[in-house]
Image (spheres, grey):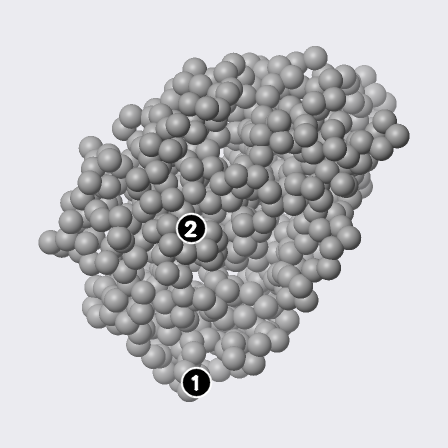
């Protein structure tokens, strides 16, 4: 059993096997080049989407002045009216020359602090030169963007915004006197109708006028045919023949739409109330709904629909670009004095969990620069019982093995991030693939891939000295190929238990947090994902709510505490956990407070408890709460902290 050296990236031109070459980079970029972008549609992009943080005192204008439009494109929204002065974050699409110019002696070396990969890359957004199919606008369209902004009716006062999946725009709960409350809707993929907003250069935008026109054109017997409206707007495929290889369906074709459910809780005509006072012991009253007479039920709405390739991306990496672009789009459609509350009920599991990921830092800076004008609310996550987090402090000379179960029939890649803080130079990592002898241990700063004698990597362990994905310590990324594929050309890794042995060869204790990245099937996708997890004999899987799991004396490294949405640990955003209306307070799937594992050694700055809470279950037997389905009058039940966060967003917008 032996490792293979990492290749030279065909896009970046970087020899990743060279000592120190991986330092400061996003390990997901290194893996993407190692497996030739097979996890991203098996297509090497012509222009690579990334998210950038600039060095202090540097502006996006300076970045553009130092670069060439031949190899760097930044959407005009980051240099327009909506971008607050001092903003040091932006998204971009870059060509190979970018990687030359961020090196010492290059034009951008003194300007760029770090950048993260923002794939998946889509053909429709892959060419900012203006010559390709679905091209982005070149830099010269800045004037067009300003003219477009002036022509729009910008929203003022209180505005409620959503970054999610499909929104049922014609649903009665999102209308006022029969007309759309959704002032702007931006769909980030290539489908649908509408114009491409020059501010961002991709996707399609609809205005309230577009939505109203589609509703007027589809009235039958005095009633709006909502299904026909969504077909007309390209938000539904009902009655259309889909390609055999189509990997997603439109959420508005079904009874359940995550975005519609969330928006109803945030801005619908009724609010969820719990009447549990003065009830007999053990009596579980159903929740009641009250007619809303609040600002949230009247406020104009902005909705951003994430590209489904972003939703199904098992690395979580593309969320940084698309959520940041979504936030800037929302701001571009509001006046400079509008008070905007944004709900984001999506997220990832892996990451530093200390607020230093690039997207979290960008959201924190936007809030800081805009003051009380902008509030961002995020779900705390539903992974509390998924066994996707392990925490272990190793003393001098100690070894500990984590068993990571990769499931069969998983057609997506799987990832574990090992975050190391104190004295990390002494930490070695040894990997044993399922049914195989151990591979040689890798030291701090070493990275290799395993091909098992083939040409394509089945896995890689990428262990840079520092990473772009966090600002404290480093992250060792274990990336594994799918365990199943219909395509015979795609390399598949063995399923079973991957043994990850942590070895502390240093002189001081070292704390390690291991996070398995999200890999479940999201509403609206058919990805074939299978969520991997950690295993050990001490972790109680009986479902007993009083299990010994997070007790300080439990020897299991698998901890429920610490499972948290990794884009919701910023210092200025608001994270929301889920509680029950009756019965034991916290939903089993939600992070909770106080932290039951608070006494355990932890890396500095790690966030494990939500900032706020709201109802996400009725009681232990009736999981979830009711809210809007995809058609007027329909009610569906969904569970999760996605239900909790919009209720807190509503309170924030109302000024409570």
The image quarter in which residue 166 lies: top right
Residue 78, percent across and down? 34, 35
The image quarter in which residue 297 lies: top right
The relative height of residue 19 versus residue 618 in the rendered view (above or below) is below
What residue is drawn where x is 29% and y is 25%? 85
Residue 195, percent across and down? 52, 39
Quarter of the image with the C terminus is top right
Q: Visible in this render: residue 343?
A: yes
**Residue picked out by circle 2:** 135
Number of residues whose C-alpha sits closer than 10 Å to that of mark 2, classed few (under 14), some (14–19) or many (20 or more): some
Q: Nearer the viewer, mark 1 or mark 2?
A: 2
Left or right of 244, for residue 132: left
Residue 623, percent across and down? 75, 40
Q: Earlier in the sequence, mark 1 or mark 2?
A: 2
What residue is drawn where x is 59% and y is 16%? 654
Viewer-proximal residue among 251 and 533: 251
Left or right of 148, for residue 110: left
**Residue picked out by circle 1:** 454
Label for residue 414? none
Q: Visible in this render: residue 444?
A: no
Quarter of the image with the N terminus is bottom left
């Amino acid at each position: 059993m032996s490792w293979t050296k990492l290749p030279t990236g065909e896009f970046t031109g970087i020899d990743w096997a060279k000592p120190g070459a991986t330092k400061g980079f996003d390990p997901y970029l290194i893996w993407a080049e190692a497996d030739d972008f097979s996890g991203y549609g098996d297509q090497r992009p012509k222009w690579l989407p990334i998210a950038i943080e600039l060095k202090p005192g540097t502006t996006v204008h300076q970045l553009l002045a130092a670069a060439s439009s031949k190899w760097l494109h930044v959407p005009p929204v980051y240099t327009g009216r909506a971008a607050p002065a001092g903003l040091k974050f932006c998204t971009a699409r870059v060509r190979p020359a970018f990687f030359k110019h961020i090196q010492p002696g290059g034009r951008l070396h003194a300007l760029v602090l770090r950048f993260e990969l923002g794939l998946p890359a889509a053909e429709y957004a892959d060419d900012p030169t203006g010559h390709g199919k679905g091209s982005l606008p070149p830099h010269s369209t800045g004037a067009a963007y300003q003219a477009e902004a002036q022509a729009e009716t910008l929203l003022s006062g209180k505005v409620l915004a959503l970054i999610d999946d499909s929104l049922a725009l014609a649903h009665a709960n999102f209308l006022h006197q029969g007309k759309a409350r959704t002032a702007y809707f931006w769909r980030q993929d290539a489908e649908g109708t509408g114009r491409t907003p020059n501010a961002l250069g991709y996707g399609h935008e609809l205005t309230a006028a577009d939505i109203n026109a589609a509703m007027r054109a589809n009235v039958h017997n005095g009633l709006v045919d909502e299904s026909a409206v969504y077909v007309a707007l390209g938000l539904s495929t009902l009655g259309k023949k889909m390609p055999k290889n189509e990997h997603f369906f439109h959420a508005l074709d079904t009874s359940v739409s995550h975005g519609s459910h969330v928006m109803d809780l945030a801005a619908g005509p009724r609010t969820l109330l719990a009447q549990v006072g003065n009830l007999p012991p053990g009596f579980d009253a159903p929740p009641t709904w009250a007619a809303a007479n609040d600002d949230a039920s009247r406020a104009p709405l902005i909705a951003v629909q994430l590209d489904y390739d972003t939703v199904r991306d098992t690395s979580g990496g593309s969320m940084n670009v698309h959520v940041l672009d979504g936030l800037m789009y929302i701001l571009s459609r509001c006046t400079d004095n509008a008070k905007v509350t944004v709900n984001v009920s999506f997220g990832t599991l892996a990451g530093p969990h200390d607020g230093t990921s690039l997207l979290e830092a960008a959201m924190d800076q936007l809030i800081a620069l805009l003051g009380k004008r902008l509030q961002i609310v995020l779900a705390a996550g539903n992974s509390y019982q998924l066994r996707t987090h392990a925490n272990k402090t190793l003393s001098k000379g100690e070894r500990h093995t984590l068993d990571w179960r990769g499931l069969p029939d998983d057609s997506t890649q799987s990832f574990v991030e090992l975050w190391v803080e104190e004295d990390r130079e002494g930490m070695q990592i040894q990997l044993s693939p399922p049914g195989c002898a151990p591979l040689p241990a890798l030291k701090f700063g070493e990275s290799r891939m395993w091909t098992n004698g083939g040409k394509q990597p089945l896995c890689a362990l990428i262990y840079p000295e520092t990473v772009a994905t966090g600002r404290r310590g480093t992250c060792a990324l274990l990336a594994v190929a799918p365990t199943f594929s219909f395509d015979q050309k795609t390399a598949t890794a063995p399923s079973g238990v991957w043994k990850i042995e942590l070895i502390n060869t240093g002189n001081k204790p070292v704390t390690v947090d291991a996070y398995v990245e999200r890999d479940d099937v999201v509403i609206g996708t058919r990805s074939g994902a299978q969520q991997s997890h950690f295993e050990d004999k001490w972790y109680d899987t009986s479902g007993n709510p009083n299990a010994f799991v997070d007790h300080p004396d439990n020897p299991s490294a698998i901890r429920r505490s610490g499972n948290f949405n990794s884009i919701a640990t910023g210092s200025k955003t608001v994270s929301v956990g889920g509680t029950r209306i009756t019965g034991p307070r916290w939903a089993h799937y939600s992070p909770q407070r106080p932290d039951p594992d608070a006494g355990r050694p932890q890396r500095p700055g790690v966030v494990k408890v939500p900032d706020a809470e709201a109802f996400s279950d009725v009681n232990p037997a009736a999981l979830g709460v009711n809210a809007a389905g995809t058609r007027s009058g329909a009610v569906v039940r969904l569970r999760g902290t996605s239900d909790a966060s919009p209720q807190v967003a509503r309170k924030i917008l109302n000024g409570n």
